[in-house]
Image (spheres, rainbow, N blue to C red):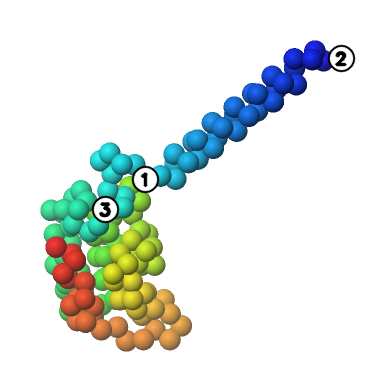
């Protein structure tokens, strides 16, 4: 037979492991505060000078009405602003950049939608250029 102290010690050990797991999970879910730009607004992250270099590429793609190049330039720009958790798609970028959600989803539909509407790159550029600075 097991000693009477075994079960309380086992319960204490398992409870301690559960607490450590919960703490680690909670810590992983929270953005890092010191030096992190995972949730910074555009223009407030690291790589600001690099992002200015991507703006002409995005502008030209928009003026050429080229949604594929615009998507690539936008996602590259987003990687420079949200370095810890960069958006990997236009939908994810729309969650990070809610003020341009409708424009981003319109671009996404032009690329991946069933009907693929004609995309107006000029209008898109007029909407987003202010927040790229």
The image position of residue 121, as x and y in percent, is 23, 80
Q: Secondary structure at mark 3?
A: loop
In the rendering, which numbered label is found on residue 7?
none
Q: Is residue 38 above or below residue 22?
A: below
Q: Is residue 132 left or right of residue 103?
A: left
Dot 1 and dot 3 residues touching (CB under 8 Å): no
Dot 2 and dot 1 residues touching (CB under 8 Å): no
In the rendering, which numbered label is found on residue 31?
1
Q: Quadrant of residue 79?
A: bottom left
- Which of the marked residues, 2 or 1, is nearer the chain's N terminus? 2
Q: Is residue 26 left or right of residue 126?
A: right
> Which residue is rendered at x = 28% and y = 39% of the image?
34
Q: Is residue 91 visible?
A: yes
Residue lying farthest top? 3
> Which residue is rendered at x = 18% and y = 50% of the image?
47
> Which residue is rendered at x = 23% and y = 78% of the image?
124
Q: Is residue 46 left or right of residue 114?
A: left
Q: CA distance from mark 1 to mark 3?
A: 11 Å
Q: Secondary structure at mark 2?
A: loop
Q: CA distance from mark 2 to mark 3?
A: 59 Å
Residue position marked by numbered label 2 in the rendering: 1
In the rendering, which numbered label is found on residue 40?
3
Q: Quadrant of the N terminus?
A: top right
Q: Secondary structure at mark 1?
A: loop
The image position of residue 4, as x and y in percent, is 79, 15
> Which residue is rendered at x = 36% and y = 45% of the image?
31
């Amino acid at each position: 037979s097991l000693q009477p102290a075994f079960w309380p010690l086992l319960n204490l050990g398992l409870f301690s492991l559960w607490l450590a797991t919960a703490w680690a999970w909670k810590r992983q879910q929270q953005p890092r505060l010191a030096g992190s730009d995972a949730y910074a607004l555009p223009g407030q992250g690291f790589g600001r000078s690099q992002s200015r270099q991507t703006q002409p590429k995005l502008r030209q793609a928009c003026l050429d009405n080229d949604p594929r190049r615009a998507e690539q330039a936008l996602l590259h720009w987003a990687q420079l602003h949200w370095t810890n958790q960069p958006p990997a798609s236009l939908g994810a970028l729309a969650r990070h950049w809610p003020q341009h959600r409708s424009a981003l989803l319109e671009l996404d539909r032009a690329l991946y939608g069933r009907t693929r509407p004609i995309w107006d790159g000029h209008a898109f550029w007029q909407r987003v250029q202010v927040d790229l600075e």
